[in-house]
Amino acid sequence: MKHFVWLLFFPGFLCNLNPRNRNPLTIRPDSLVTWEGSCVLIPCEIGRYGGAVLNPITLLWYFQPFYDMRQSEYNGVLLYNSSMASGYSNTHLRDSQDRVKFVGNLNHAERKTCSLKISQVRTEDNGIYGARLFASYSRPTQQHKWFLNATIHVAESPPAPIMDVSPTYIRESLVRVTCSVTYHCPDDPLRVVIGLEKNHLPSQRMTTINGVIKTVVSFRVTWEDHRKNLFCSLERQDRSEISKSTKQLDVNYAPKGVQLIALPGTTIQEGQALSLECTIKSSNPEVYEYCWYKDLQLMYGCQNQSKIEFEAKGDQHSGVYTCEAKNSVGSQKSEELHIDVQSHSQDTSTHSASESKPTAHDASAGASDSRGDPAGPSCSSSEEDSEEDSEALEKLLLNTCKELTSAVVELTEQLRKARSQIKILRQRTCVSLGK
Ligand SMILES: *[C@@H]1O[C@H](CO)[C@@H](O)[C@H](O)[C@H]1NC(C)=O
Ligand SMILES: *[C@@H]1O[C@H](CO)[C@@H](O)[C@H](O)[C@H]1NC(C)=O
Ligand SMILES: *[C@@H]1O[C@H](CO)[C@@H](O)[C@H](O)[C@H]1NC(C)=O
């Protein structure tokens, strides 16, 4: 199968090698762009034909050529005739004698060139330019002729360099910028420079191949370059600007500067409303969801709201919180935030002293108010108090006193014993330490 395919193409390949089907003329590039006031050079070469150097040759350049059927020959506005002593015809192109110049070399033994240059280009120079070649080979008597044309596009003003940024989807990584402009005027060499905002980027490489000035630069973009302007500038050697193209950088990056903020604060009382807000400094594209973590566990899932609110409950809500902002590029977490919800049980322990005061005050106030209350405690020595009551009271006091006395005696005895024990122990330690 492979061989069969080869056979199909082989005859064609041979035909291309056939000298009779080849044109010794080459114009590359054959579509040229220039602008008013600039110049343009049509790069033309005459190669070997059937392995032989063509000699002698005659070359004609026409503007807007056409094939004249009656004369069986090309015709048009003759710009150059190498057979004429001066080379130039009585031109029909206004003032073209000064502006149109043959810059080829037909006498070179090997590398014959046939380039044509037009200076101070005008809009009327826009059009087709044809090269007509007459030459002899093998036998001097046998004349051969070939034709080839080129197109010149004259723009009113210099074109802006074509800027290509790759990759097209930019992240915080290496980006390659290529700026090119087609230019075919060797008299006034230009350059293309690439910059970001107002500064030229370092390490630019410029080449000029086939009439294309191309500058390439690679640089690392950061999220801070987002929305900055890249520019390509076509400049003269003196750095004066001819044209410029700009492009705003669209850098995609994960959210930056994620912060968790608690309102009214990180220490709150139970039952108070707690509001947590996840703020970001920057993100491109926009954040699509916020995830909430408490003690490293995903809490309340992920939502597209940057704020959550709830009524704080001590055990449930005290802890370490973080939030995470996500966009299509990636995510970033905030620093940890410690939230302390002070519960009511903690409240009573800390506030018991102050709270007991009003209670005591209330009780005494109640006593003074409720004189007629039979159940209320009464300490006044009213005459209605019975003898029996006082006797019982006396007995109680006496008993208590007795119990207390014996307890004191007991304690004193124990204290004495302990003291003597300590004394003995001290002496022993002193002896053992040799003092
Ligand atoms: C070119 O110049 C030669 C010599 O003057 C002349 O014989 C010939 O006709 C000219 N060709 C054209 C196309 O004018
Ligand atoms: C110029 O060349 C192109 C491509 O070879 C051809 O199509 C066109 O007809 C030519 N123009 C003239 C005037 O010969
Ligand atoms: C957030 O979610 C709601 C409901 O799910 C939706 O209507 C809204 O468009 C979302 N907003 C964003 C910015 O994604």
Image: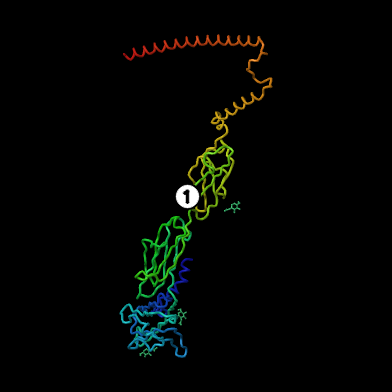
Q: Residue at x 57, y 28 (%)?
A: 357
- Estimate the x, y position of residue 28 in percent, counting from the top left: 40, 75
Of 250 and 146, nearer the camera is 250
Q: Residue at x 54, y 11 (%)?
A: 404
Height in image: 322 above or below 347? below
Of 72 and 96, nearer the camera is 96
- Estimate the x, y position of residue 175 in percent, counting from the top left: 43, 59
Height in image: 105 above or below 85? above
Query: Taking 18 as reference, is 323 left or right?
Result: right
Query: Taking 21 as reference, is 361 left or right?
Result: right
Q: Which residue is mark 1?
A: 257
Q: Quadrant of the rendered structure where residue 355 is?
A: top right
- Estimate the x, y position of residue 155 in percent, counting from the top left: 44, 76
**Amino acid carrying mark 1 in the image:** Gly
Which SS class for mark 1?
Answer: loop
Query: Taking 101 as reference, is 408 left or right?
Result: right
